[in-house]
Image (tube, rainbow, N blue to C red):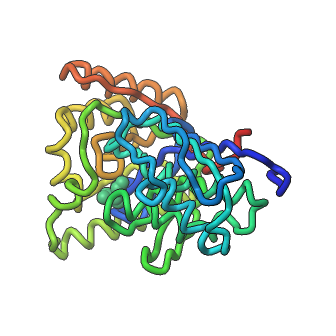
Amino acid sequence: MPSENLQEVRVFAPATVANVACGYDVLGFAIDKPGDEIVVRFSEEPGLKITQITGDEGKLPYAAEKNTAGVAALALLEHLGKSDLGLEMEIHKKMPFGSGLGSSAASSVGGAFAVNALLGEPLSRKELLPFVMKGELMADGAWHADNVGPSLLGGIVFIRDNESLDVSQLPVPEDLWATVVHPDIEVLTKEAREILPAKIRLSDVTKQVGNLGGLICGLMNDDYSLIGRSIEDVVAEPYRKQLIEGFSEAKAAALAAGALGFSISGAGPSVFALCHGEELAQKVGQAISEVFAGFDREHQVYCSRVNKTGVSVIS
Ligand code: HSE
């Protein structure tokens, strides 16, 4: 357990699958890997300095006020009246940008959580949410908690209202596994949001709300079949799938291999399948992998239970 005597903390903030097909901007879950590592330590010099960034191919700024993890940490420090505190931060990116795995959200969560842990946990996890949202907002220009929520709190997080950050954690069935595949295509969240229509048909609203309710009921009752029937997205997937070469083939292969359901992870290009049990999750991963390999597309496959812990101190 972190204490005020700590001189340094290293935290791991997990990747997340946002939307979960039927919950555009209001539903997400955390997975075991990949994830980002953030180190924060006290320093003599006042203010927050980012001293090392790895795994970012030189893309991330060192200026704390321009960096997702830095922005979240600075917002927390300001709230605590400790803006002048001397701190150093290292950011170790372990997942690609624009991957649909909540990369910026994980950094934002890791930044604020590490500072909070180093200071002896003045705030609870849930109380950190408004500060990690500021980092995420800077990264993709939109205010949605479906990546930061699960990365921070763990499990499957439902957001009734993004403005007031009214979030709840949903039950996670014991044998629910996720297969997440990241094809090496860059999709920027901002652009993937811009291609969505401003208005949707009432019949699509009905369908999406029905599926969202169905998924929640399925999670509450360990009803895997209902979970599978509810993994359908009539709002974003029809528009975004064209950004992911091989999407339809991968979906067909995953469902044929026994996945409960399949859709886009967040804004893409990563895709995910929900599966009943680990064996099936591996088999589905293999099936999706063969499709992307057939398109000559580099990709990574991750099979994981839902990560119920969220961000954690690792040393
Ligand atoms: N809900 C967001 C979107 C997630 O779909 O744009 C982005 O990671």
- Residue 215 is left or right of residue 41, and the answer is left
Ligand 1's image quarter is: bottom left
Asked whether residue 22 is in view, the answer is no
Judge from the rendering whether residue 300 lies leftward or rightward of residue 247; answer left or right. right
Quadrant assignment for the C terminus: top right
Q: Write the residue at 26% across / 72% down.
A: 206
Q: Quadrant of residue 14?
A: top right
Q: Residue at x 39, y 44 (%)?
A: 60
| Of 230 and 168, the residue lying toward us | 168
Q: Is residue 234 above or below residue 81?
A: above
Residue drawn at x 69%, y 47% is 41
Nearest the eye: 112 or 194: 112
Q: Where is residue 187 shown, x and y percent of the image?
A: 24, 44
Q: Position of residue 54 (x, y in %)?
A: 48, 33
Percent position of residue 134, x then y:
46, 67
Q: Is residue 133 above or below residue 280?
A: below
